[in-house]
Image (cartoon, rainbow, N blue to C red):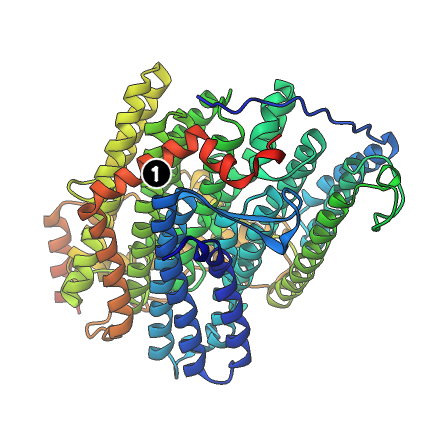
Amino acid sequence: MGDFAVPNLLPLPVLLPLLGAALALAFRRSDRLQRIVSIAALAGVVVVAAVLVWQTDASGPQVLWLGAWQEPLGISLVADRLSALMLLVSSVVTLLVLLFAIGQGHADSDDEVARETPLSIFHPTYLVLTAGVANAFLAGDLFNLFVGFEILLFSSYVLITLGGSASRIHAGTTYVVVSLLSSALFLIGIAATYAATGTVNLAQLAIRIGGLDSGVALVLQLCLLTAFAIKAAVFPMSAWLPDSYPTAPAPVTAVFAGLLTKVGVYAIIRTQTLLFPESPLTDLLLWAALLTMVIGILGAVSQSGLKRILSFTLVSHIGYMIFGIALSTQAGTAGAIFYVVHHIIIQTSLFLITGLVERIGGSTSLHRLGGLAMASPLLATLFFVSAMNLSGVPPFSGFLAKIGLVDAGIAVGTPLAWVVVAGGIVTSLLTLYALSKVWSQAFWRPLAEARQVAELAAEEAADEAEQFEQAELDAGRRPRGTTTITAAPTGVALAVDTSPRALPRMMLGATAAMTAVGLSITLVAGPLHAFTERAAADLRQRDPYVTSVLPEQVRR
Amino acid sequence: MTTLAPTGFESTLTPNITLVLVVVGLVAVGTALALDRSLVRVLLGMVLIGNGVAVLYLVVSGRAGRAPFVGEDPAAMSDPLPQAMVLTAIVISLATIGFLLALSYRLWQISGTDDVPDDAEDARIQRLARDDETSETYDRSEESTTTSDERAEAGESRG
């Protein structure tokens, strides 16, 4: 492949899904055409991303100035090793989740679930979401990054409220308002950056921010960091996540959990390394990492719904990535990148497995599940492997990712770094605890026992709901006759059936493939680790990025 | 660590104090509204914050000047870049506000009120604390195996 073909690929990860979305919308009457279009578009992105990874590794960052304006006036798309790797992982994940969703649509086509999840809207929105994610990864300036965020956020608003049922609207409201607020903060950050430096191009900012007064630079850094931390769900800005993710349809939750927070993490990595390399905020970020890990996992331990447990582990494990970023050493950054790759895949596969659990068991509440290992040994195996992977049991990639970060933390060696290392290990153990609780209750315990516990829980919950309703009425918070959202599951409609629905092959296949990808990270850990080291070296040096984006005469 | 020499870029910006005050006012009022419980007020708050941010971009674009057309004297032009950015932001916030309006209408349809609902989980934990009960995850299934076996048998013999 000649060099001339290189830059031409850069817009494709954004354009292909957008084009696919338009076509999918045009074909909304035909499920089959929609599926073909969506799969083709996303498979195309996977190929392009794989080529980009190879190209950036072989010949440095790829740059495209759009619209042929004279640099540095136009908008630039940039793919360095980090962007290309993120793009590849995210496109593989979106493709597999799409297959899962199609399998679900197939299985539910004449079911009430189908009405709940209108597929004709799902495909175009999902494709726009992937376009937004790709745009955020490839953005070469702050404002284009903002646009990427908005594209993906807007499609996520639609996906999270799909079907407009009560619980989804409730969850969606919180989500939209929080996202709006973080977008406003991001805009303020961009305005302040432009006022201080006269540019929003990341490469130019890398040069100019160094010359700013340190106080001004700190304000810019805090503003951008806060905006990204809300999107990445870093404590104390993480409370929105466990409330909004669990209600969405399984494939939507899976792709949100895998990707959306990681786009925020990516933005933090990018700005911290490129714009603020001598960050005065190391300690602040280390505290944030520690609290995110520990408080997140304590939330997971105290939950009784599978989806909420996983949402809390998601928040908690964001802490590991922030830890790696906060260290601001090459090993730390490399560890963070490796962790992002591992976590995108493993968290998505766990949520896909949850989707299948919900199909078999009819619920994701641990009080109502039981005997799943008997009902579907394959699903149980997938869950077990993924759970062990997430909690960092050797030889899975979770272990390797955590070891990398622990190593980097010990190398830094400050007392606070040691504390966070210890916090990370405790978090890993607590993750194991939370997930083995799921294993022993939902998968391993006999059905009869599950039934009894469910009956007890249902009775108690009914009592509780009654009391709550009364309290609300007493407080005059709510007019009489309105429904309560906390209403407990009525009756003893037992979730676990003795003859569970067979799992659709396509959904199971997509989930198994996702888990297999997660396992394969262990196999390619050597090359992948070397790649993340090189990516981190690029990021720490900053030169490769800046010199390839800006021609010499405008490098100021 | 880095070989990039910082350049002496000097910002020539002199902020317009009136516009700054407008931004402060809009964002402050917007924040106050956004803290309300009614979703429509939150939404209005968001609109005001968005407008405040839009005006902030006018502050950022420096002194007012002529429209930036080709052929105009560059010294007399106003800075077009913040205007381009803020136009994008306005379009995006228009769409989002529209969506949020639809959401609050749907919320009203469903629950007869547009109050942002209590966080279900939060409410549950508060209730447990008030009643001084053990949490729901106090694991009933972790009672000794014998007890659960006995119960199972008792249940079977009864049924």
Answer whether residue B45 is visible to the viewer in this image.
Answer: no
Point 45% across, 59% down: residue: A247
Q: Along the line of sight, which residue is nearer the eye, A42 or A123?
A: A42
Which of the 4 image quarters holds residue A404?
A: top left
Name above or below for residue B93 compared with residue A528. below
x%, y% of residue A86? Answer: 39, 48
x%, y% of residue A181? Answer: 63, 44
Q: Along the line of sight, which residue is nearer the eye, A201 or B140?
A: A201
Residue under label 1: A297
Three-letter code, disc 1: Ile
Point 16% across, 56% down: residue: A445
Name above or below for residue B119 compared with residue A336. below
x%, y% of residue A340? Answer: 36, 43
| Horizontal relation, residue B34 to residue A396: left or right | right
Which of the image's four quarters has the N terminus of chain A?
bottom left
| Horizontal relation, residue A132 to residue A423: left or right | right
Name above or below for residue B47 compared with residue A216. below
Answer whether residue A221 is visible to the viewer in this image.
Answer: yes
Which of the image's four quarters has the C terminus of chain A?
top right
Point 31% across, 59% down: residue: A354
Q: Chain of mark 1?
A: A
x%, y% of residue A355? Answer: 33, 63
| Horizontal relation, residue A459 to residue A33: left or right | left
Q: Along the line of sight, which residue is nearer the eye, A177 or A485?
A: A177
Crowding near the residue tagged with mark 1, few <14, some 14–19, many ≥20 C-alpha atoms within 10 Å? many
| Horizontal relation, residue A539 to residue A444: left or right | right
Element type at mark 1 = helix
Q: Along the line of sight, which residue is nearer the eye, A351 or A88?
A: A88
Which of the 4 image quarters holds residue A265?
A: top left
